[in-house]
Every structure is written in structure tokens, then in C-alpha cells.
Amino acid sequence: MDKKFGEFGGQYVPETLMEALIEIEKAFAKYSEDPEFNRELKELYENVANRPSKLYYASEMTKDLGGAKIYLKREDLNHTGSHKINNVLGQMLLAKKMGKKKIICETGAGQHGVATATIAALFKIECHIFMGKEDVERQALNVFRMELLGAKVTSVDSGTGTLKDAVNEAFRQWTREVEDTYYLMGSVVGPHPYPVMVREFQKIIGEEVREQILLAEGKLPDAVVACVGGGSNAIGIFYDFIKDEQVKLIGVEAAGEGLDTDFHAATISKGSTGIFHGMKSKFLQDDFGKIMPVYSMSAGLDYPGIGPEHAYLYSIGRANYFPVTDEEAIDAFEYLSKMEGIIPAIESAHAIYYAMNLAKQLDKDKIIVVNLSGRGDKDVYQVAKYKGVEINEQ
């Protein structure tokens, strides 16, 4: 199993965690080739996650924009409302096979936390979730959902109180409980084997898209578009198309209030190579390698780095990454809601906005597939607040 993607990836962790990482790597290598494990996982995908998820032709959106056909991969229809459950089912099943008694994880927007709490409840395993204080306030509904499912949620107020700080605290906790605890990483970030392992549990998205689009259109898409924070939903839909060079792979990152401000999370656009959270990748950092504060109204995209495989795909020119601001994402959030009757996660709305503009530039015989990575129930109050609309919660 390759530990690096070109110069990116690796394992940069304290010695106390190396043994745990080696244990996870060996278990993953063993069970990923085990027919019984894969049979169980397939059943969980079908019976729990509600897979395969639908590939939806956005006919009204396509007609209105007047250009390329737009299809949406409806990961928002999965149980718990996002793509996160794909990876959680895989890693939770692995932890169960390893005999672990407790799960810990980080979460930003709360979608990974909700998925982890849900499957922990199903598997009857203790669950401890770390979430930045800022995100706890922004995503109060998801915090209640996690606690309702039986998880312990710890609010992290160090640093900026966002996703990177939740990861920091979860890692610290793991070092204290490493013997019987499994760290369930939510994205394609962190030390090896997490970037590979999370990708392997998310690549079902792209595999399904290939089969579905060939059935619907008789050819592959011209472009595949996905939002990128750490990058799990994007690598999930990209991976099966990497070898198809005629398919453009487009990641959309959070430009927040604009790239000319200090309030964004556009890692590829404005970042540089460094080491953080156990991996070598691209990060938003100063000249001395200190990680900079980041901002996005999307709690799932305000991470100061990107998964090492994305950094590699960008470095070799196989994938391109573009910024979309808060304001633009909200425009797309409202547009999709009104045009197709689908309220997207604000994370996914970043990808929708880019696809809206791309479609106008392409001929009508071209095809764009957008990964609709999550549903937007969690973001309605935040978007209303942004727009100055007062909502009575009673």
C-alpha cells in the first residue's frame, strides 16, 4: 500500500501513534481483500446507507442555463444526509473487526459526526466526537442529533474553534486512549493509511456514476465537479475517472469573503506545501510554516489544508481547483432550491455555483456531473442569518 502520492502524504506523527497506525494499516490491508468483509460492507451500503444513490438529471437547471446537461449525484439522499456515511460504515466495520471498544472522531459541519454517531448507535459502540466551538454554534442542530444518538460531543475552544482545532484535540485524546480506541478520520487527510483508506470507502460514488451515466447517456461525462475541504466527497467521485483523461476533474474550494481578504479557505489557490496533521500536503500557512486561520460560512470547508492525493492530482495537472465565495455559494443554494426543489448543503452549493457557470460555457451535447455531497437542512438558519432574514424557531 503506497504511503505517498508523489511528494505528498506520509506519516508525520508522534511515536505513541505509530503503533496504532501500523495496526490500522495491517487490518485494512487484510480486510479490504477479505470476501466476507466486503460482503458485509456491501450489505451495509445497501441496507443502511441506502445505496446506490441516485444520479439525477437536473432538467430544469439544464434548460434554464441553456448549455451542457447537468446531472447531480444525490449523496444528500443517503441515510444521515451526506456522503460521509460511506466512509463511516467502512471504518466502523474495520474497527469492529479489530475489536476496538471506543470510537473517536472530529467533525466540522457535523455531517461526519452525525454519521459516526448513527453507526456507533447501530453497532453499540461508545462514541466521542470533537467539534470546534464555532462550528458547535453554527451547527447546533447536528450537535443535538449526535447527542440524541448517544454520542458525547466535546466543544473545542482552542485556536479558531473550527475543524482543524477539533482534529488537534481528537488526536490528543487518541494518544491517551490508543490501546482500545479507534480514530475514525472523516476525510482523505491525516497520516497514512487514512487518505488511502477513506478514498477506498468513498470511491463507490464514482463507480456508481460511471455505470449510471453510461446507462443514461451512453458516454462518460465531460466534467466531474465537487466541493473540496479535506476532499473526501471529491476524491470519491474523481477516483474512478482519473484514468479517463478526457473527463475534466474540478474541485471547488471555499473563497469565503474573497481571495484578496484573509477570510477564505482556498488551499490550492493560496496555499503552499507543508506538514500538518500527520501529512505532507498543501496548507494555508505563513512563511514560517505556521497554519493560518481560515474562514468559510461552510463549516465543512473551513479546513486549512487539503488531502495529499488532491495536492498530487493538482501538481500533475490531472485535476483543477477553483474558488467560490460565500455569496456565490448562497446564490447557488437558492438557485437549486427554486429550480429543482433540492436544498443543498452549503458545501455542495460551492460546486453547484461553479457548474452553473461552466454549463453556460459548454455546448448542449456536453455533460457535467456534480457531486451533491449533502443536504441543506443544517444550513437554512445560517443562510437566513446571512441574508438578514429573522426566523422564529418556535
Image (spheres, rainbow, N blue to C red):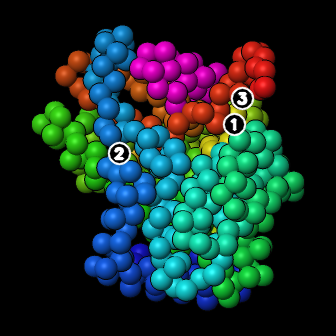
As displayed, is residue 48 above or below residue 298? below
**Residue at disc 3, secondary structure:** helix
| 317 on left or right of 302 | left
Residue 360 to residue 250: above or below: above
Horizontal and vertical percent position of residue 318: 36, 48
Binning the other alpha carbons within 10 Å of mark 3 as few (below 14), some (14 to 19) or many (20 upward) gives some
Which residue is labeled 2 in the image? 53
Residue 296 is tagged as 1
Kindly tell me whether residue 312 is visible in this rendering.
Answer: no
First in residue order: circle 2 vs circle 1: 2
Residue displayed at 37% across by 17% down: 61
In-front residue for pair 19/155:
155
Magenta-colored span: 321-344
Q: Quadrant of residue 222?
A: top left
**Residue 13: image location, x then y, percent:** 67, 77
19 vs 96, nearest the viewer: 96
Tell me what residue is drawn at x 72 percent, y 56 percent.
Answer: 147
User: Is disc 1 placed on a helix, strand or loop?
Assistant: loop
How far apart are the alpha carbons under marks 2 and 1?
A: 28 Å
In this picture, residue 107 sits left or right of residue 31: right
Residue type, label 3? Gln
Q: Are marks 3 and 2 in contact (CB under 8 Å)?
A: no
Q: Is residue 334 shown in magenta?
A: yes
Label 2 or label 1, whichever lies nearer to me, is 2
